[in-house]
Amino acid sequence: MYEQVARVRDDVGMSPAPLYRQIADAVRMDISTGRLPPGSKLPSERELIDRFGAARGTVRAGLNVLITEGLITPAQGRGYQVQQHEVFTLDASRHENLLFSRPEDGDSFNNDVTQVGRTSSQELRVEVTEASAEAATRLEIPIGDRVVLRYCRYFVDETPWSIQATQYPWWLVNAHPRLADPVDVREGTTRYLADRGVKQVDFHDEWSTRMPTPDEARELQIGPGVPILVWVRTGYSPASQPLRRTVTVLRGDLSRVTYDIGDRKSSPHREAEGQ
Amino acid sequence: MYEQVARVRDDVGMSPAPLYRQIADAVRMDISTGRLPPGSKLPSERELIDRFGAARGTVRAGLNVLITEGLITPAQGRGYQVQQHEVFTLDASRHENLLFSRPEDGDSFNNDVTQVGRTSSQELRVEVTEASAEAATRLEIPIGDRVVLRYCRYFVDETPWSIQATQYPWWLVNAHPRLADPVDVREGTTRYLADRGVKQVDFHDEWSTRMPTPDEARELQIGPGVPILVWVRTGYSPASQPLRRTVTVLRGDLSRVTYDIGDRKSSPHREAEGQ
DNA sequence: TCGTCCAACTTGTTCAAACGAGTTGAACGA
DNA sequence: TCGTTCAACTCGTTTGAACAAGTTGGACGA
């Protein structure tokens, strides 16, 4: 199927790209042109060795570039595969607090998920710990003060989606003890608090991106080359008192986030698929 | 300085981590504990070879893990260095449209930059092109319609910071021709339009993250292991007519984004340094 | 027919060697 | 003193070999 590719080594003048990068470029081109569509299997290392007349190490160096770029995934015994993502959109400006909260909460994300025929599930863990310096600053409490930490990992079908850790100051937990219940608050913590007169009206959101730590990569089941989105939301009462601080780590390859700012209510945006 | 590390190979039962990952873990630990502070030089490959009794390829595989995680940067002839970032924060909810716009625009970002004693600069390029499918959808114009593309690369001091491409629909350019001027609009395009009665009051923002393409990596001068933030903002008139669409690509290692949502005006957040 | 087993694939890990190319600082000469 | 040169360091690229370990499908036997 492939003819032997003439190796570009003996140029005069400008030095050619190193062989491993030529390999990466060639395969990347095959991907971007659609010759290798998402989900398809790459030629095996053996085939690429023959095609480029390179050593195995060189071929692997080239493929490693594409792994780092998040374009392909290796699987021992099965070969390399072109990444395919199904992106879910999260409307952060309408989002109350928790991903996957109940539809009655008016949350848009769970709807997004279930409307596509997916099932969402979650693992919950609740602890009482001490506030870190960062959290204490945001929650405007002394460092080391007791807080309730509600830790949650969310799944779409079987795929880990995000990790979320919410810290509530102790004074709030005292008044509303179900926050410390190690079980799911059925109607959602935001609704629970709202029903008891504690309303979050303001948010401060902070976004950043980075590569996952090994722990995060394990929990989200992502390989190298996939960045994460880190979302830190602090919620405030009408009196500008911090009520909670939520740190959410989202898989970058599966997530898109939107904000609608201004007067328009429901945005009439068609879903434009991009890249 | 370092004693020979006993290699963990012959465990019974659970197979040990491969050597290259042991090396990565050891060095990562040195970084996270501060034994190797940001900006410091790593031991050379030679030293690590001796310390772990591994082949050079194995040591390089280990270091490659850390490069992919964005923790270190290699420099030919000079050794490896622990990454050090100076993060700049961009307040997207107060942000008018362009990064680095003039202080009179009330933009917070340029202030952030100059207040720290940095200088911001930019490269501008203006073209007339045809709207892509995506852009046309957002701008609510026919696909292939003429648009003005204002392309800009921003720098902090000498460091590339972000790449920004704004598309204006032709009907707007006709009415406000300076949008097509291949020179900097001194007072900022947002202000320019506002002064002429065209006010952007609503925004639709879309955020995602991914690894850069080779082109983006070159333009932003980022190495492997550094993700980018992609920000797509569509601006609307009070009549909900799309006025422009801006795609901004930000270096993930240097950027943090905030949104303040709700009634509170200026958020009294102290700058809490995290991570 | 239906499991089991195994051969033949796949990628994962590691070694050893060689040469190329960028950087640095010390020795040297003008 | 100052510039040049160069040795000795750094990482960059490539080869070839070997064995480990996961996957798959077909042959084979019950």
Image (cartoon, coloured by chain):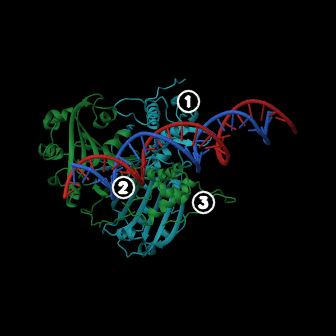
Chain colours: A cyan, B green, C blue, D red
Mark 1 lies on a secondary structure that is helix
Residue hosting label 1: A50
Is residue B184 found left or right of B95 in the rendered image? left
Is residue A112 found left or right of D20 in the rendered image? left
**Could you tell me the amino acid type at mark 1?**
Asp
Given this view, does label 3 or label 2 mark the residue nearer the observer?
3
Q: Label 2 near label 3: C-beta < 8 Å? A: no
Chain bearing tag 2 is A
Which quarter of the rendered picture does the N terminus of chain A lie within?
top right
> Can residue B255 be seen at all in this image of the molecule?
no
**Relative to B66, residue A201 above or below:** below
Mark 2 lies on a secondary structure that is strand
Residue hosting label 2: A207
The percent coordinates of residue A164 (x first, y second) are: 47, 59
Residue hosting label 3: B7
Q: Do labels 3 and 2 share a chain?
A: no
Label 2 and label 1: CA atoms lie apart by 45 Å
**Could you tell me the amino acid type at mark 3?**
Arg
Which quarter of the rendered picture does the C terminus of chain A lie within?
top left
Given this view, does label 2 or label 1 mark the residue nearer the observer?
1
Is residue B251 found left or right of A26 in the rendered image? left
**Could you tell me the amino acid type at mark 2?**
Trp
Q: Label 1 near label 2: C-beta < 8 Å? A: no
Mark 3 lies on a secondary structure that is loop
State the residue in front, D30 or B2. Answer: B2
The percent coordinates of residue A165 (x first, y second) are: 46, 62
The percent coordinates of residue A104 (x first, y second) are: 45, 54
The percent coordinates of residue B38 (x first, y second) are: 37, 61
**Relative to B264, residue B224 above or below:** above
